[in-house]
Image: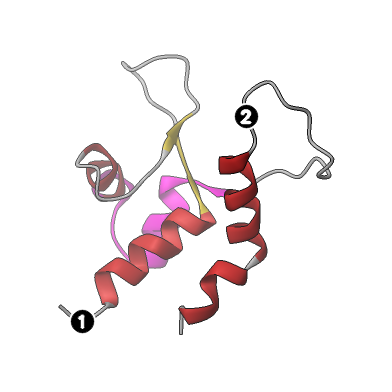
Amino acid sequence: MMEGASHTPAAKERSWQKTASAGERSSQPDRALPFITPAEVATRLRVTPEQVRCLIRQWRLEAINVGTGPKRPLYRITQQDFEDFLFARTKPK
């Protein structure tokens, strides 16, 4: 199911971001990444938002802290990171 994942728009956006250096201006259109909240992830996984935050703190689910500091983090997860998390949890061992 995820074989073509590298060809999705989110994957292309992510690969482009990795190649651009910090000071370069882009010819890419200004697009916002599709961020989702821990509560939205929790709804999709049928768990509590606190369990999702625990996965983030344990480095099992990648997230970005858009809050103002470490005492009160405000996490956002990209759609691609969420899909990667699901794929890693569903592939056979």
Q: Residues within 10 Å of mark 2 (few under 14, many from 20)?
A: few
Closer to the camera in the image, 83 or 47: 83
Picture coordinates of residue 54, whole percent (x, y): 22, 43
Q: Which mark is residue 92?
A: 1
Amino acid type of the residue that numbered disc 2 sits on in the rendered structure: Ser
Q: Residue at coordinates 26% horizontally, 69% vertically from top-left?
A: 89
Quadrant containing the C terminus is bottom left
- Front residue (pair 85, 49): 85
- Tell whether 45 sits left or right of 27: left
Task: Please say if 59 is above or below 8.
Answer: above
Inspect this view and state whether residue 17 appears: yes
User: Which callout, 2 or 1, points at the residue further toward the start of the chain?
Assistant: 2
Q: Residue at x 41, y 47 (%)?
A: 38
Please identify the quarter of the rendering in which residue 57 is found. top left
Is the residue 12 above or below the residue 21 in the image?
A: below
Q: Position of residue 9 (x, y in %)?
A: 67, 63
The question of residue 49 being in magenta is answered with yes
Query: Label 1: how many residues lie within 10 Å, few (<14), some (14-19) or many (20+)?
Result: few
What type of secondary structure mainly makes up the magenta span?
Answer: helix
Q: Residue furthest left?
A: 93
Specify the segment rendered in magenta.
35-51
Mark 2, residue position = 21
Q: Percent x, y for residue 19?
A: 60, 41
Does residue 45 belong to the magenta stretch? yes
Q: Position of residue 64 (x, y in %)?
A: 45, 35
